[in-house]
Image: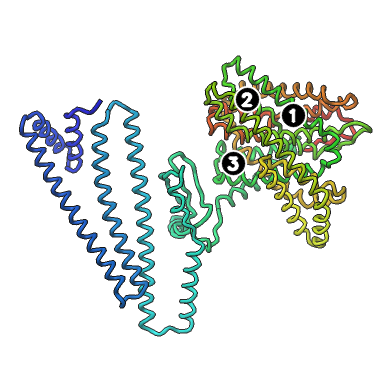
Amino acid sequence: MKVPGFISLWAVTSLLCGQLGNGTEHEDVVKHAIKLHRGKGAVITQQKQWVMESCRKLSGLLRQKNVVLNKLKNAIRAVEKDAGLSDEEKLFQVHTFEIFQKELNESENSVFQAIHGLQRALQGDYKDVVNMKESSRQRLEALREAAIKEEMEYVELLAAEKHQVEALKNMQHQNKSLSMLDEILEDVRKAADRLEEEIEEHAFDDNKSVRGVNFEAVLRVEEDEANSKRNASKREVEDDLGLSMLIDSQNNQYILTKPRDSTIPRADHHFIKDIVTIGMLSLPCGWLCTMIGLPTMFGYIICGILLGPSGLNSIKSIVQVETLGEFGVFFTLFLVGLEFSPERLRKVWKISLQGPCYMTVLMIAFGLLWGHLLQIRPTQSVFISTCLSLSSTPLVSRFLAGTVRGDKEGDIDYSSVLLGMLVMQDVQLGLFIAVMPTLIQAGVSTHSSIFKEILRILILIGQILFSLAAVFLICLVIKTYLIGPYYRKLHAESKGNKEILILGISAFIFLMLTITELLDVSMELGCFLAGALISSQGHMVTEEIMACIEPIRDFLAIIFFASIGLHVFPTFVIYELTVLLFLTLSVVIMKFVLAVLVLSLILPKTSQYIKWIVSAGLAQVSEFSFVLGSRARRAGIISREVYLLILSVTTLSLLLAPALWRAAIMKCVPRPERRLST
């Protein structure tokens, strides 16, 4: 349905009225236009006159533009042939003429784009929201492209201004004799210009035409300062350094990652303030939890809650804090591997492999059953079940770090079983992340492609199993030929200087992390295997390395647990406390019962008593559900409400974990072996 002629005339008249003064004049012009429209011959005459006059003006402007362009081309040729001008002066003048040519061409394009936009709007259906939305999107794209072109023209003007300054300096140098110091400074200036040209990356020009790149409108926000004078002077500096914050239309905030000029050192002061604030507030929060008998990690989580979006909202660099906190996980799992020697791994490898697999299958089966009863999509049920089947390796590692364990003759150590199963869950995490794209496609696929999806999942599982075999083969080679000489060299070079030892061990951790990442296996598994390989060198080696790495691990673990608190929302928990408590208790009890059932089937009869402790350690939900939940929410697998429920259930289960662990230790471990870490 097109807009009738009366509406079209009204729209054109309204546009013309926008150039006039007050509202009375607007009404007079509209009434006169309606009279002309109702007349029989007058409107045609007026339209012809208006069209002829407008076309005459437009054609005159276009002819004048072509004349100016020809003159500019002749001027450019004349400048290039002028032998009396220096190279800098030629560059400046030619650059200025070219910029003016671009401005004329862009002005002409803007006129025709405006005409086409008006024509498209008048021919559209004013009752069709989709059509108006598409028109708005096209106008927005045009505005973005225009803004980008204007930015590029402004940058070119700055470059032309720089060329002009260089030309003036060159003329001054020709008119006077330079001192030795001036000549040295001139040579340094030219070398600095060449350095900037060599190291500068044209990231904008290189990526603007890449597929998937979109132009976005952003706000550049300067940080408010109490002192306005200081703010004004600081803004001049930040305009050059690019340290202000950018915010897009989706409320995402961005900071500088790589500056155009890499010769000037820069620091993200927001990130520095965030780390300092977390470090200072973690002390009283951890101290308070110690006084009431809770693990200190909950104090660090409370610190993140207080500073995060649900509290004071003082953390600006949330992504950077979370990234640094990931290193706390890496070093925590490395120390877990130090205590988990290959000999202990061989002793419980069957249980560690079978237990998590059976538990995951049972969790998915129960999830599909409940999903069918509650009419939840199968992809969503599989995701939620797998997410809840994982347990927190860093949390249990902190529990085990404060527990003295003594094996009975012929029995299996519960810590070995528990850590082995947790490491296998980390492997499952990598497998699940690899399968997530297929799970996303399965949510929108038709029934005709279900066999292809099953085949694809089986191929992915085969790839993961091949990657695991390759990882363990590499570990075998490293343990046999490399790790011994490598540590002895580090030990010899680090006498009197622990710096080399710390760097060498850290480099080995990152090497194993990189290997497992390249093979599409969990990075956490690489950190664990690094510790297990080093522990094969003996107890003395383990003690020496642990003494060096533990302080680093403790600080980074504080950042990690504080980053968890950034995603905890107490107001949401309070609003839905009854539902969340019911869901959390249901998940914890279900995981505990399933773990007891599975361990009863796979543990030897002489070690059946440890199933209660191991089940208590597996009854909470891993903090990696935050990562999986965020990815699933972005992919459309789960809704916002389900995402918040997963976050809240995970947090509450982690809060219940110390009480359940304490109860299991009190019941199953003899008194001389008890010591729960606080």
Q: Quadrant of residue 129?
A: top left
Q: Residue at x 34, y 34 (%)?
A: 134
Query: Among all residues in the image, which is located at the extreme top?
Result: 373
Residue at the disc numbered 3: 307
| Position of residue 197 in the picture relative to residue 458 (left or right) | left
Residue at the disc numbered 2: 382
Mark 3 or mark 1, earlier in chain? 3
Q: Which mark is residue 74?
A: none
SS for dot 3: helix
Residue at the disc numbered 1: 356
Give how far apart the Cα atoms at labels 3 and 1 are: 36 Å
The mark lying in front, picked from 2 and 3, is 2
Q: Residue at x 13, y 48 (%)?
A: 56
* Kind of residue at badge 2: Val
Residue 334 in the image, given as x and y percentages of width and height: 75, 45
Residue 633 in the image, given as x and y percentages of width and height: 55, 31
Image quarter of the N terminus: top left
Nearest the eye: 221 or 422: 422
Q: How many marks?
A: 3
Whether residues under marks 2 and 1 lie with C-beta atoms below 8 angstroms apart, the answer is no
Query: Among all residues in the image, which is located at the extreme right?
Result: 409
Whether residues under marks 2 and 3 lie with C-beta atoms below 8 angstroms apart, the answer is no
Residue 299 in the image, given as x and y percentages of width and height: 68, 39
Q: Residue at x 37, y 53 (%)?
A: 151
